[in-house]
Image (cartoon, rainbow, N blue to C red):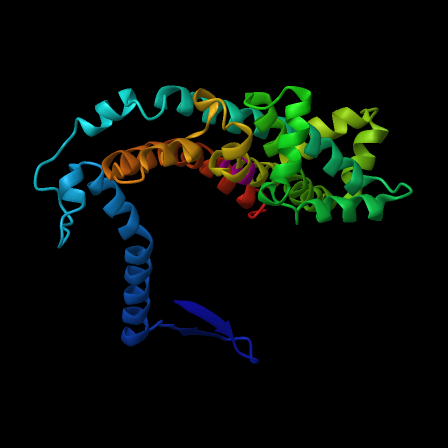
Amino acid sequence: MSSKRLPDGTLKSSRYTTVSDPGSVTARVVMAVVLVVVFLVPYLVMVLSSFKSLDEVNRVPPTLLPQTWHLDNYVAMWGVSETPLPHNLLSTIIIAGAATLLTLAVALPAAYYTAKFRFPGRLAFLFLVLMTQMLQPAVLVTGLFREFLALGGAGQLWSMILINAAFNMSFGTWIMHSFFANVPKEVDESARLDGASSWAILWRINMPLVWPGIVTAVIFTFVAAWNEFAASVVILSGAPQNQPLSVALFSFVGQYQTKWQYVFGVSVVAIVPVLILFAIIEKKLVAGLTAGAIK
């Protein structure tokens, strides 16, 4: 119920009723169901296949549900002879986590400084940062291997931490740069008049305002480092215990036989930490995006 004042000063009540088009609603529901099926069915097949035996995975015609549930696949795969899977999982966590922290430690101050200060060569520096995003480890893997071989880093975790951090630095810098640039300069000027130092303005004033950008950089950097394959398969080729899960998966692919039940099982295990990260950060990301929406 709403009221509208007429030119003569009297109030006229009116009732508005919103009528949804049944055909439009049905089309949207159908489209949503199709999208859910397209995106979730491959994961469902992967999870269900991880509980099958090798013969059942290779059965023709295939079945969706396992005829016999082999829960022991998730126990047996940790002790296989093809690869030291527990060490691979630990190496993946160390590489992805350390690379993400190193990226933030360097990209955060760089993004803040380039967004807030004008200095000679600023545009050239930003252009150079953007250009590095176009280079991928697969293109430079030969040169990187020779470089780290000379430095004694071939087969070492720290080499992959540096590589993943370097190749995600530009993305993290650009993402956070745009968020820092959108913070009004009056906020910084007010804090500076109150005696705050540049570091205090960054950590205490700007950080809470650019939290969505930081979370975005963390998610993309962590996922990119977690899934990195091309550089790891070359630089860590001589150290199976230091290889990440993305490389360890190929240990189950043989010339005459592929142990698909373990491939699916390891794939499920590799997805779980990423899902946990999204579950932890998602609330903070939404809170940051909606902050200040209601005044």
The outermost residue toward the bottom is: 7
- Asked whether 134 or 182 is in front, the reply is 134
Compared to residue 139, the image places residue 12 above or below, namely below
Taking 261 as reference, is 87 left or right? right
The outermost residue toward the right is: 120
The outermost residue toward the left is: 67
Where is residue 104 shown, x and y percent of the image?
64, 30
Would you say the magenta stretch is mainly helix, strand or loop?
Answer: helix
**Residue 221 is covered by the magenta coloring:** yes
Residue at 21% in and 42% down: 49
Taking 67 as reference, is 292 left or right? right
Where is residue 12 shown, x and y percent of the image?
45, 75
Where is residue 80 shown, x and y percent of the image?
28, 23
Compared to residue 18, the image places residue 266 above or below, namely above
Q: Which of the 4 image quarters holds residue 85?
A: top left
Residue at 89% in and 41% down: 119
Compared to residue 16, the image places residue 220 above or below, namely above
**Residue 15 is covered by the magenta coloring:** no
Taking 6 as reference, is 113 left or right? right
Taking 284 as reference, is 37 left or right? left
The answer to whether residue 182 shows anywhere in this view is no
Q: Which of the 4 image quarters holds residue 251?
A: top left
- Specify the quadrant that holds the N terminus: bottom left
Magenta range is 219-224
The answer to whether residue 190 shows anywhere in this view is yes
- Asked whether 45 or 112 is in front, the reply is 45
Where is residue 248 shown, x and y percent of the image?
39, 31
